[in-house]
Amino acid sequence: MGDGLIFIGGMKNGQLPFGIHLDDEQVPQLIALLHQGDAVLYDRVMSSLFFSSFCIKLDRPRAYDSTIGLAEVQPEALLSSLGVFASEIGAYRRPTGTGIQVEHFTECILVRSYASCSDHEHKAIQLMNSVQMQSLSLIDETLRYWMGRGNGLTPSGDDMLTGILAGDAITGICSDRFRQHLSELIELEALTTDISREYLRYALKGQFSSVVSNVLHALALGDTGNLMKRTRELLSVGHSSGLDTAFGILLGMLTIGRNPIWHKKS
């Protein structure tokens, strides 16, 4: 629609911020009726999308808002749940889409031992540093390194950036300059896929898929039991997208963990 995308499908990966969601059993039936190049019309009065051989009527009462609206994040709870979150991701025992072993990376950060870090791990540390800096050249270099990096419809680097922005939604850890430059690169340059671009557009507005939002709520409230469950749900998304997004959230959490201002808040 215009220069934006709308997802129409089931909810196996949760509710998406730009999604129209159907019952899972309906999806293969409708896909069989689709033809490439068909026009799709939206009738505002009937609140319906018309395809060549079927229509989808939107259920207005079931519309949802994917914006993270946490009125009061509890800093002490957030910091205390960091270890549980990191352990749950590390226990997954799989590298991210860019080959980073989360458990090894986390250990390097916590003990400040970087000699054994891989190139991607050093770049991840650079990303942690850049989110709070005002140096446009560092921000630009870092974002260009990660945007579009990796394979798939949503490359791993973009999933990490979505995770960073998810962490920012509950901590405010990213500088205005970082957010502004990311927005400019999304809109002005073709550095990644159309689908990743859409996820990042919404992430900059604080809107995420429900599997990400559920993790953020559990983190912010220090609800460790629910956090473990919600993290596992996120990790199960896609081939590596869920893990890459979770790793991005972890980068944001590790960043505030190093921030003395947050420790004073708690």
Image (spheres, rainbow, N blue to C red):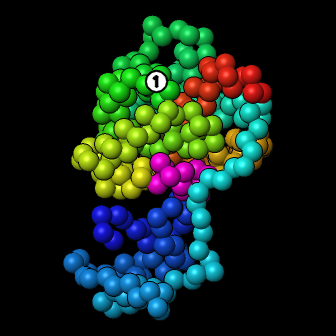
Can you give x and y, in whole percent of width and height, for residue 47 in the image? 48, 87
- Asked whether the viewer can see residue 81, the reply is no
Measured along the vertical axis of the image, is residue 244 above or below residue 33?
A: above
Return the x and y of residue 119 as percentages of the image width and height: 36, 19
Residue at coordinates 72% horizontally, 22% vertically from top-left? Answer: 263
Q: Residues within 10 Å of mark 1 (few under 14, many from 20)?
A: some
Residue beneath the point at 45% across and 7% down: 115
Q: Position of residue 82 (x, y in %)?
A: 68, 31
Magenta-span inclusion, residue 212: yes
Q: Give the left or right position of residue 183, taking residue 102 as reference.
A: left
Residue drawn where x is 45% and y is 76% of the image = 27
Question: With 110 as the anchor, is 20 left or right in this view?
Answer: left
**Which contiguous range is marked in magenta?**
202-213
Is residue 208 left or right of 146 when viewed as pictured? right
Instruction: State whether residue 218 is above or below residue 251.
Output: below
Residue 31 seen in render: yes
Q: Looking at the figure, which quarter contains the N terminus?
A: bottom left
Vertical position of residue 6 compared to residue 67: above or below: below
What is the number of callouts on the image? 1
Q: Which of the 4 image quadrants contains residue 210? A: bottom right
The image position of residue 123, as x and y in percent, is: 39, 23
Q: Indicate whether residue 65 is drawn in magenta.
A: no
In the structure shown, which secondary structural element does the residue marked by tag 1 occupy? loop
Q: Which of 5/188 is in front? A: 188
Q: Residue furthest left?
A: 37
Residue drawn at point x = 56 percent, y = 39 percent: 168
Viewport quadrant of the C terminus? top right
Amino acid bearing label 1: Met
| Residue carrying label 1 | 133
